[in-house]
């Protein structure tokens, strides 16, 4: 017996490392001291008075199941980065590096490299470095050729510029930035409805969507980092919330001071057809839709009434769509009207 006969191919792992080194190097930004291949990644912080590190970790959940069904792995890595860096930027932090964890029962270096190239693409979009990661070959642990992904991002922000939400007041304006679709949340429900209840396949063409179901579901999560970082240089943003699992109901209260809540007004932004398609097919109650999915809004910003127009103008100048979707009220909880 040897390790390979037990199911672990060290040579395939080494081949993967050599394949991804140049991919990771394309993401390097000033501050990277050592990256992929060593025992740890090194990053130097400079030109900051009181730097505060901000970290976020996540995975892509059962969206991976759709990637397996479609045998497509070029975008799932973008999702992984997005889910982490979008959380980090909610504090006003600039993501500086990212690390991933790729675990599978049987390592296929070519498939893993496709995933990691997507991770590198996500890092470029976020302006951070792919500093390292871990590949784990775990025989018999996962089903067939399936794998799991997780990752984490670390960002940095000056202590006096952290966005905390503490300054949010009654009457403040809620601005929504559109999502690209489902992003990476609610896929357990979406798959149940679309593939089990309806009997659809990833190659099924859906007229109301104008594309196949696989293409729609695998649209990568939008990365909002550059939008937010540019915006906060020009106008005060009091709070930022990433609309992920829990939707509007659970994510907006996370940034509000005690005693405050939010009113969200339906019809103030366009909702993509995929949400109506899932909701109608699954006969899902509206509250459940707004708690499970982002419903077309991937990130919300809270600003004062005096600054709201400037926020919209700055985003428009960046060619980014944004919508005033509600306001802050003096009662806890989120109401969608």
Image (cartoon, rainbow, N blue to C red):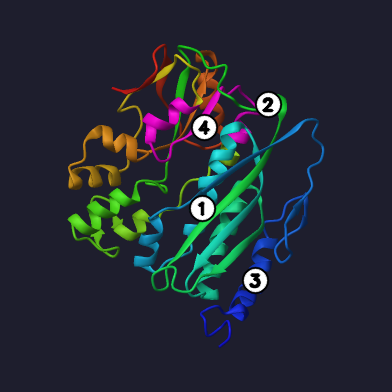
Between disc 3 and disc 4, whose residue precedes?
Answer: 3
Q: Do residues under tags 3 and 1 come within 8 Å of each other at their CB atoms?
A: no
Q: Which residue is mark 2?
A: 161
Image side of residue 136 versus residue 234, left or right: left
Mark 1 vs mark 4, foreground winner is 1
Q: Which mark is residue 17?
A: 3
Q: Quadrant of residue 156?
A: top right
Mark 2 vs mark 4, foreground winner is 2
Element marked by disc 1: helix
Residue 269 placement (x, y as % from top left)? 36, 31
Q: Name the residue furthest bottom.
A: 1
Residue 294 placement (x, y as % from top left)? 37, 39
| Quadrant into which the C terminus falls | top left
Between disc 1 and disc 4, whose residue precedes?
Answer: 1
Between disc 2 and disc 1, whose residue precedes?
Answer: 1
Image side of residue 31 versus residue 231, left or right: right
In the foreground, 166 or 86: 166
In the foreground, 336 or 10: 10
Q: Which mark is residue 167?
A: none
C-alpha gap between disc 2 and disc 1: 26 Å
Q: Which residue is mark 4?
A: 316
């Amino acid at each position: 017996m040897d390790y390979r006969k037990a199911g672990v191919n060290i040579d395939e792992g080494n081949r993967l490392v050599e394949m991804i080194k140049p991919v990771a190097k394309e993401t390097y930004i000033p501050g990277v001291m050592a990256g992929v291949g060593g025992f740890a990644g090194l990053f130097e912080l400079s030109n900051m008075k009181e730097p505060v590190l901000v970290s976020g970790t996540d995975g892509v959940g059962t969206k991976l199941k759709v990637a397996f069904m479609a045998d497509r792995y070029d975008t799932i890595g973008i999702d992984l980065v997005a889910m982490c860096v979008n959380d980090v930027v909610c504090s006003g932090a600039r993501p500086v590096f990212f690390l991933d964890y790729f675990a599978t029962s049987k390592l296929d270096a070519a498939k893993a490299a496709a995933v990691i190239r997507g991770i590198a693409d996500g890092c470029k979009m976020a302006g951070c470095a792919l500093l390292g990661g871990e590949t784990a070959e775990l025989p018999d642990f996962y089903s067939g050729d399936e794998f799991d992904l997780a990752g984490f991002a670390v960002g940095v922000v000056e202590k006096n510029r952290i966005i905390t939400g503490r300054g949010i007041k009654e009457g403040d304006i809620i601005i929504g930035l559109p999502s690209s679709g489902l992003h990476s949340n609610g896929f357990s429900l979406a798959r149940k409805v679309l593939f089990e209840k309806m009997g659809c396949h990833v190659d099924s063409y859906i007229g109301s969507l104008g594309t196949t179901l696989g293409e729609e579901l695998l649209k990568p999560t939008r990365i909002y980092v550059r939008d937010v970082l540019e915006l906060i240089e020009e106008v005060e943003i009091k709070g930022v919330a990433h609309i992920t699992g829990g939707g509007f109901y659970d994510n907006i209260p996370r940034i509000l001071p005690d005693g405050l809540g939010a009113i969200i007004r339906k019809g103030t932004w366009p909702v993509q057809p995929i949400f109506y398609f899932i909701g109608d097919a699954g006969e899902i109650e509206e509250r459940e839709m707004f708690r499970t999915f982002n419903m077309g809004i991937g990130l919300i910003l809270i600003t004062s009434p005096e600054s709201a127009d400037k926020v919209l103008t700055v985003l428009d100048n960046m060619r980014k769509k944004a919508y005033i979707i509600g306001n802050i009220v003096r009662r806890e909880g989120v109401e969608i009207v």
